[in-house]
Image (spheres, grey):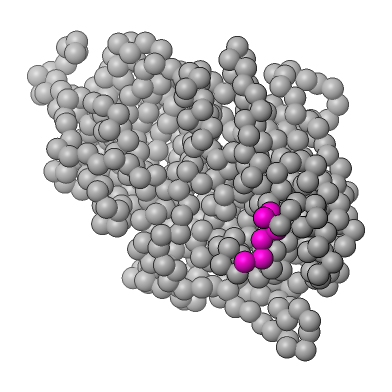
Amino acid sequence: MEKLRATSSLRRSLKSILNRQLSSVSEPRYLNGKRSCQPTFNLIRDHRNLGEANPILYRCFSSVSTVVQRNPSFSTLNPDDISYFKQLLGEKSVIQDEDRLETVNTDWMHKYKGSSKLLLQPRTTEEVAQILKYCNSRRLAVVPQGGNTGLVGGSVPVFDEVIVNLGSMNNIISFDKVSGILVCEAGCILENLISFLDNQGFIMPLDLGAKGSCQIGGNVSTNAGGLRLVRYGSLHGNVLGLEAVLANGDVLDMLGTLRKDNTGYDLKHLFVGSEGSLGIVTKVSILTPPKLSSENIAFLACRDYSSCQKLLMEAKRKLGEILSAFEFLDIQAMDLVLNHLDGVRNPLPATMHNFYVLIETTGSDESYDREKLEAFLLSSMEGGLISDGVIAQDINQASSFWRIREGVPEALMKAGAVYKYDLSLPVEKMYDLVDDMRTRLGDLARVIGYGHLGDGNLHLNVSAAQYDDRILEQIEPYVYEWTSKHRGSISAEHGLGLMKANKIYYSKSPETVKTMGSIKKLLDPNGILNPYKVLPHSLNS
């Protein structure tokens, strides 16, 4: 390592950061959406009228939320429907087994649970089209489903909607090494695409903790953000085209592979982030960047949030084009990970720090990138922004650093009940909300803050032994009002789903929401696609 000009003490400190080895590194276990932990409390309450053929008429999905009423215009399944689907798809792709249905009716957090009696597994776009055409004619509500790793109740039924899971549509259609454009079906698991591209010398612009289970169609439908948005941008920029099936069975072929196309309205953007409420995405064309040869990961400690902010500013200035991730977590998040995830070790074991930052750089020149990172760390230490830190010396250490950041959601689930809020806020205001929530809740619950500092995305989590009305009353609507007051978004990357459908006005004007409702009515006049989600229920009354 080339010596840097500095005082002897700074030189020693920098050397300790750059060369420190972890005494023991475990292989990372990425959050993959599997239900390994037991639910602490089921928030769903069914209200039944035993005199009706379909007894579940309305449900309450949180202790103080508005009751969700079943749309009376929707039909219920009958034997003729089952016969039609079996003839269309074959016996094996029409699932009525109670154990299988239990899994697909329940979301990853065990917070939302539907009562669907039917799971369909189409293998082609034409089969999806025939399913929707039939369901629309019969007014059978439908829930599109991918890996079911969502956090806002968007991928499971509310009542008895038919589940259409795209997991069997998992083929890679083409890959162009010259342009880096990948075309694939919606059911491809994100981690499989990452592995495929890695063998081709490319990477996915999207990386999530749930990569082992989530599917690209679901990622696109929720406009998932992930860990490297600061470098590669959102899916609105990386998705070049898609194919989608409308509620009436019409197939929209927008599967372009061109970087430039200004012919008319760019309709694909309606389906990116619409959570399956406008149509079912069946194929995707996505621009993938080349895999770069140089990658460095630094795990750093900061004494306060102000230092984290200043460190981000310095990273953007001094790391520039090689900065690919800038994540942060507070001491409470770090403590949860260390206490609830097996095999995770603290990279900075001497003491616990108030804040931790994970910085990743990727580039094409190892020596240049390393020198650039070292110079940045030295100046940041000299300026008092970094209290301690370590750079990964090999891929195992790099994986162990990422395991800490990606493991926070899993640790929260294992810790007990959790209230999750995914917010976009001005970076300078992000942690003020965490502090305010701690003041409001006092000893009632533990407040955790972490997220994608590089793009202003806070994951605010409230952890408690069990769900409690007193806790929720202190959180909502305060957290939404606070976010709206500071011109933030109540959903940065998780979507609205069922959880936030009625909260959309905190981020969007009435005129905007009304226009959204008009688009929904145009593309899905019977409202069969993912009902009760995304838009406020008042629009459907």
| Vertical side of 251 occupied by 172: above or below | above
- Does 93 lie within the magenta span? yes
What residue lies at 51% left-to-right and 28% top-to-bottom?
Answer: 196
- Please tell me in which quadrant of the rendered image residue 224 appears: top right
- Does 246 lie within the magenta span? no
Part of the protein shown in magenta: 92-97
Q: Position of residue 129 (x, y in %)?
A: 81, 46
- Please tell me in which quadrant of the rendered image residue 6 appears: top left
Which part of the image, by quadrant, shows the N terminus?
A: top left
What residue lies at 81% left-to-right and 70% top-to-bottom?
Answer: 78
- Please tell me in which quadrant of the rendered image residue 357 appears: top left
| Vertical side of 125 occupied by 262: above or below | above
What residue lies at 33% left-to-right and 70% top-to-bottom?
Answer: 443
Q: Is residue 30 visible?
A: yes
Query: 464 or 434, which lies in front?
Result: 464
Query: 521 or 92, which lies in front?
Result: 92
From the viewer's perspective, is 232 left or right of 281? left
Q: Position of residue 240 (x, y in %)?
A: 69, 26
Q: Is residue 441 visible?
A: no
Q: Position of residue 17 (x, y in %)?
A: 19, 28
What residue lies at 83% left-to-right and 49% top-to-bottom?
Answer: 130
Number of callouts: 0
Which part of the image, by quadrant, shows the C terminus?
A: bottom right
Q: Position of residue 267 (x, y in %)?
A: 79, 34
Query: 116 or 384, which lies in front?
Result: 116
From the viewer's perspective, is 250 left or right of 463? right
| Vertical side of 170 occupied by 33: above or below | below
From the viewer's perspective, is 256 left or right of 503? right
